[in-house]
Image (cartoon, rainbow, N blue to C red):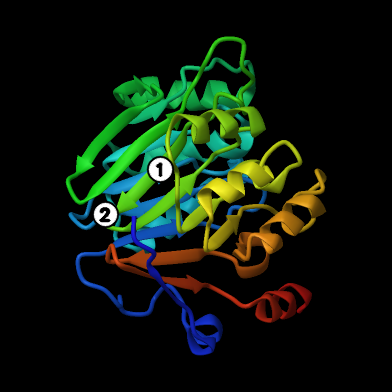
Amino acid sequence: MKKTLFIMSLFVFIFCSPSVTSAFEDEMTVHFIDVGQGDAIFIETPLEKNILIDGGPPKAGEKVVSYLQERGVTTIDLLIATHPDKDHIGGLPQVMRKFNVKEIIETGKVHITKTYYQYTKEIRKQGIPVRLAEANQEIYLDPFVQIDILNANGKIQSNNQSSIALNVRHGNVDFLLLGDIEKKQEKKIIEQEEIKAEILKIAHHGSKTSTSQTLLEAVNPQAAILTYSKNNKFGHPVPPVIERLNQADALIFSTAAFGDIVIETNGDYYFITPAETPVERMVTRSS
């Protein structure tokens, strides 16, 4: 895979917002929605297929719904629940109630919690088809986008270890989306195939369980996306993860600092647009 040009200027960094007219034709747009301590990733493909990966915690459901509605979404062609933890599926019942969800891919992992019950209850109520993820499986939705499942549920694995990990490729630009997998799963992925990605969604919100030096050397990301809440009780992201990302010379973007993060790509170049700068976000929260 050839190295792509990363486009970032001071003007874009400070002044642009997701409402800016698209810079590319035949593009794929990936939205890392700020849901606090959790994950919600929305992908718009070149052929206008809508993919939602996770929905954040329960309190984020309203944010995810409004974010999609503001972009004119009425149908979600594919919803992927990476694993049944509260901070990933909590907002999905609200999403299912507001949008026509055509299909769900999930791990099949059973989790005895109120959040999981609400999630499965809404699936049954809406009659949404559910397919179980399988490692080394390709998801066919748009011929211009290749989506490979790199990790799925296995025997005697925790929810995090069973997370659905994905490589999403449009042309020469790759997004490696790792859910909450741990170092053992990272190692298995890079042993199975050569993985290079321009954009790396850091696993488990920057926890000490993930983002090994071996992974970063194999992937060689240009930009790293961290999804977490600034004052979370887990201490995410841990300093060693940030240190390794700095050593890898990866530009770091977090939803805690930048809010919603939008990445547009035409398959050759990509363009990162944060909703806010850290200074703007600090002023907003203190006012």
Q: Which residue sits at x=82%, y=45%?
A: 233
Q: Position of residue 287 (x, y in %)?
A: 76, 79
Q: Which residue sits at x=71%, y=55%?
A: 244
Q: Is residue 102 visible?
A: no
Q: Nearer the viewer, residue 76 or 221?
A: 221
Q: Is residue 172 left or right of residue 262?
A: left
Furthest-bottom residue in this view? 11
Amino acid type, callout 2: Thr
* Image-quadrant location for residue 85: top right
Location of mark 1 (residue): 167
Crowding at mark 1 (Cα within 10 Å: few <14, some 14-19, many 20+): many
* Image-quadrant location for residue 6: bottom left
- Marks 1 and 2 sit apart, C-alpha to C-alpha, by 14 Å
Q: Is residue 77 left or right of residue 223?
A: left
Amino acid type, callout 1: Asn
Q: Position of residue 73 (x, y in %)?
A: 30, 55
Disc 1 to disc 2: CB gap under 8 Å: no
As drawn, 181 above or below 72: above
Q: Nearer the viewer, residue 137 or 36?
A: 137
Instruction: Return the mark for residue 45.
Output: 2
Q: Secondary structure at mark 2?
A: loop
Q: Is residue 149 visible?
A: yes
Q: Please state the total of marks drawn on the protein image.
A: 2
